[in-house]
Amino acid sequence: MIETENLILRPLTYEQLVKYSNLDNSLEEELNIEKSPRSISPELREALEDSIIPSVRDLKKNYLYYTLWTLILKEANKMVGDLCFQGEPNIDGEIKIGYGTYFEFRRKGYMTEAVGEMLKWAKLQPEVLKVLASTEKNNISSQRILESNNFSKIGEADNIINWEFKVK
């Protein structure tokens, strides 16, 4: 668990991910937090079922690189978003980060704060050399999160901008 000024970043265990995906507030009950206005997009549902949950269940893998890290706003005691890495570092020491803020909590700086804290965490991992991210060209808010955290643009393809943050 990581704590920032406004947030608690909590990596979800296998059992917690299952509760998260059920959308029945059982996760909120377990964490003793208020119910959240969250939903699961079709893309996240597919990632949970095909990749995230099976990878977190695999005890040979470091689950911190696969799981969702939920963002709990201390002031409201409520989940406001999630982020995740998309697997352990590759041979070049690269990991990819993805994130999403629940609608009513957008544009308040929470994800900028959370991504910044996860970059600090990544710097402490000896095998991580770069954190990569991708945004849609029209997603200005997501681009600002990365720019605020000193990511650099490294390329564009179709509707996507690719970014990197050099850890070391």
Image (tube, rainbow, N blue to C red):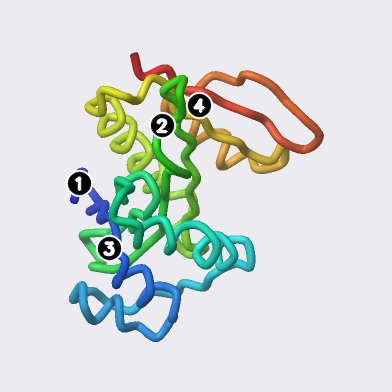
For marks 4 and 3, give the CA distance.
30 Å
**Circle 4 sits on which residue?**
147
For marks 3 and 1, give the CA distance.
15 Å
Residue 5 found in image quarter: top left
Q: Nearer the viewer, mark 3 or mark 1?
A: 3
Q: Is residue 120 left or right of residue 40?
A: left
Mark found first going from the N terminus, 1 or 2: 1
> Which amino acid lies under the numbered mark 4 shown in the image of this protein?
Glu
Q: Position of residue 103 (x, y in %)?
A: 52, 63
**Circle 1 sits on which residue?**
2
Would residue 150 be seen by someone viewing this image from the given angle? no
For marks 1 and 2, give the CA distance.
20 Å
Q: Residue 89: which disc?
A: 2
Mark found first going from the N terminus, 2 or 3: 3
Identify whether 4 is placed above or below 18: above
- The single residue placed furthest to the right in the displayed view is 158
Residue appearing at x 34%, y 13% in the figure: 168
Residue appearing at x 28%, y 76% in the figure: 28
Mark found first going from the N terminus, 2 or 4: 2
> Which amino acid lies under the numbered mark 3 shown in the image of this protein?
Thr
Mark found first going from the N terminus, 3 or 1: 1
| Callout 3 secondary element | loop
